[in-house]
Amino acid sequence: MVVLNFTLTPEAAAKVHDLLVCLGKFSDTVAIEARRERFTFTALNSSKSAYAALTLDGSQFFTSYECVPTHGGPDSRFTCSMYTKALLSVFKGRLYDPLGRDGAIDRCEVTLQDRPDQTECRFIVKMVCNQGVIKTYKLTYEAVEVMHALFDRNVAKNRWSMHSGAMKEYIEYFGTKTEMLDIYAGDDGRAVFKSYTEKVSNGKEILKHPLVTAVAVNTSDFEEFNIQAGLHIIISVRDFKAIVIHADTLKTSLKAYYSYPTRPLQFNYGCDGLSCEFTLMTSGDYNAVPASSPAPAMLSRTNSRAQSAATERTENRSMRSEMPPPAEPASRRSARRRNPGSRKVKSPKRAEPDPDSLFVTQEEEDTRWDPVDYNKEEETLGWDASAEHDAAIFPTFRDSGSLTRTETEDSNEVLAPTQRVSQIKGLW
């Protein structure tokens, strides 16, 4: 039998509402883990790329707190899962009203009904109002095994901290349809938060001009700023907005810890017995530029690219000079056999090509760069200029464009040409 009882003040109940709104942005269900000293809400999104854990301290956050798990050990716990909307229907937004108007409560009492003599297991919430009215809610829950995301802050060397109120002003500039957020530090003493989307598609329509919004913040505006220059870390804009908005409800500072792209990033904040941790999956550019000497690093990369390009051009020239010309195609040999009277006139010897030229000189009839004639004994279907293959073995299309006369398949009748090739327009 599990014993779980605790009492919340109106202000604490309103904070529970705010954290449930934040967790609703990550998952439709929220997991609960109750231990002897603390009470934790956790959520994991469907793609398993974002994990949230919001811990309530038993002695600071609650007016009274009692939790005795089943086994009774020091590390034992009680875990369950419920729908986020079900809890939000109980913990409404106007639970705490400093003016004491209608709708405000005096206290919130929560009890877990998990006894062998009871027919149903319920999560019972009682809202005791100022006028003596008691609202009782009995919620069903599901027993689940809660998992936690591990994050080592000692490995995360990149850190920054800023008040949530200032960060909330910056996220208002982000577009509503942006999907990703790129965070990086420049060399001019500024940190840039750039929200963007690669493309937006609606059926067959694609937005050709992606939405990009960049907000540059001076590093002096941060409470703490220790980021490697040029390191790009990319997270989800939606997750970042949900975190900043919830941190602003607590009026506290937002802290970020991360090492490099593809490794987890964690946001941490909290006050008055409420501790919040969000672990997000990241991507980005790992090739960061050292902050001490950015110019030499860029210069060395430029020189290396120039040297590699020069080496590639030299290799290409040597390959062209050493590569022998390909064999003459059978179509040209057959054409000469059909026209024995035509002889090739020798052209005067041309000058040697310039080795530094960007263009390749054209040889006579471009025979040097014609494709090699592959005589493979296999079934082919293509245009054959010679038309000497046996049609029973090699089914081909006959092309008589290289001949001066045209023959029909059914007869050997010779037809004289009716038009010069130079008069045909639109084919070349």
Image (spheres, rainbow, N blue to C red):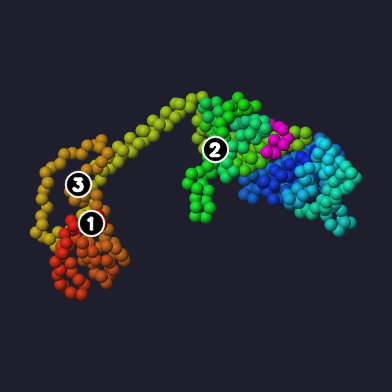
| Residue 165 located left or right of residue 217 | right
Q: Earlier in the sequence, mark 3 or mark 2?
A: 2
Magenta region, main secondary structure: helix
Q: Which residues are magenta?
A: 245-253
Residue positioned 57% across, 41% down in the render: 175
Task: Please say if 334 is above or below 70.
Answer: below
Q: Earlier in the sequence, mark 1 or mark 2?
A: 2
Q: Amino acid at mark 3?
A: Glu
Identify the residue position indicated by label 1 in the image. 425
Q: Residue at x 25, y 57 (%)?
A: 427
Q: Residue at x 63, y 40 (%)?
A: 240
Residue 278: which quarter of the image?
top right
Q: Which residue is mark 3?
A: 363
Q: What is the quadrant of the C terminus in the image? A: bottom left
Q: CA distance from mark 1 to mark 2?
A: 52 Å
Percent position of residue 62, x then y: 83, 38
Q: Which residue is mark 2?
A: 213
Residue situated furthest left in the rendering? 341
**The disc labelled 1 sits on which kind of residue?**
Lys
Sequence-first tag of 3 and 1: 3
Marks 3,2: beta carbons within 8 A: no
Residue 420 position (above or below residue 47): below
Amino acid type of the residue that numbered disc 2 sits on in the rendered structure = Thr
Q: Residues within 10 Å of mark 2 (few under 14, many from 20)?
A: some
Pick the residue in front: 156 or 251: 251
Which element carries disc 2, helix, strand or loop?
Answer: strand
On the image, the x and y values in percent for residue 285 come to 52, 38
Magenta region includes residue 63: no
Left or right of 218 in this view: 375: left
Label 1 SS? loop
